[in-house]
Image: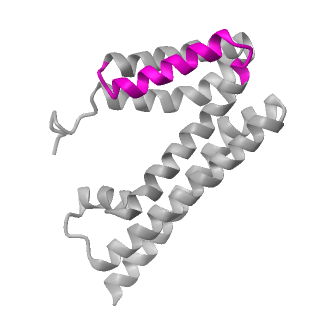
Amino acid sequence: MGVTPAERPGPRQWSSMLSMVLFPAALWIVLPLWGTRALLIIFMVLAGAHWLMGEHRRRWSLVLAALLVLLISSQAELGVRLYPVMINASLALLFLGSLRTTPLIERLARLSEPDLPTSGVRYTRRVTWLWGVFMSLNALAALILALWAPLHVWQMYTGAISYALAALLMLGEWLVRQLVRRREVQA
């Protein structure tokens, strides 16, 4: 069974995925070699690509303006350090905000299982809450490190440790889900 053209990732999805992969790579390659201004220019190129694709033009115009101000100001490093804070805070708001309606994880689960049982709805609500709390704590840790930690400590956390923690949470949730499903089948 192949993937239909409608299911294939488009330029916006590729751009978002590329941004997520490039950030840690940029921290370990660009930052030590060329510094924060080069990293800000890369962020501007990525934001400009989103803007050119017509994706939320007002939002990306504001992002581009903020990056330009940081680039020409003496706060370039702080701007780069606050990027993970903004991303994690945005994701926390996305997850936790979705709890007011249909939780984000439930929406994703219904893509593969449209007739999600009541127990699945409860489970996905809890997982959505868990991811929201995780992203909130990650944003707080990134903020504390951005403001008070040496650059190499901030770089290690935001470019490696936070990704490893997210992977562990994802793996842990998957293992719990398998146990929950197995119990439901046995019941």
Q: Is residue 57 above or below residue 164?
A: above
If the image is split into quadrants, where does the N terminus sit? top left
Q: Which residues are magenta?
A: 53-77
If the image is split into quadrants, where does the C terminus sit? bottom left
Of the pair 59 and 139, the residue shown nearer to us: 59
Q: Is residue 49 left or right of residue 39?
A: left
Can you name the residue that lies furthest to the bottom here?
187
Residue occupying image coordinates x 45% and y 76%: 179
Q: Is residue 43 above or below residue 136?
A: above
Q: Is residue 40 above or below residue 125?
A: above
Q: Give the percent coordinates (x, y) of residue 162.
A: 65, 45
Q: Give the percent coordinates (x, y) of residue 22.
A: 54, 26
Q: Give the percent coordinates (x, y) of residue 31.
A: 70, 18
Residue occupying image coordinates x 34% and y 32%: 13
Residue occupying image coordinates x 40% and y 63%: 99
Residue 73: image quadrant is top right
Q: Is residue 131 left or right of residue 59?
A: right
Q: For residue 88: magenta?
A: no
Q: Is residue 81 left or right of residue 40?
A: right
Q: Is residue 22 above or below residue 129?
A: above
Q: Main secondary structure of the magenta part?
A: helix
Q: Give the percent coordinates (x, y) of residue 142.
A: 69, 42
Of the pair 48 and 111, the residue shown nearer to us: 48
Residue occupying image coordinates x 29% and y 22%: 54
Of the pair 15 and 4, the residue shown nearer to us: 15
Q: For residue 72: magenta?
A: yes
Name the colour scheme: one colour
Residue 43: image quadrant is top right
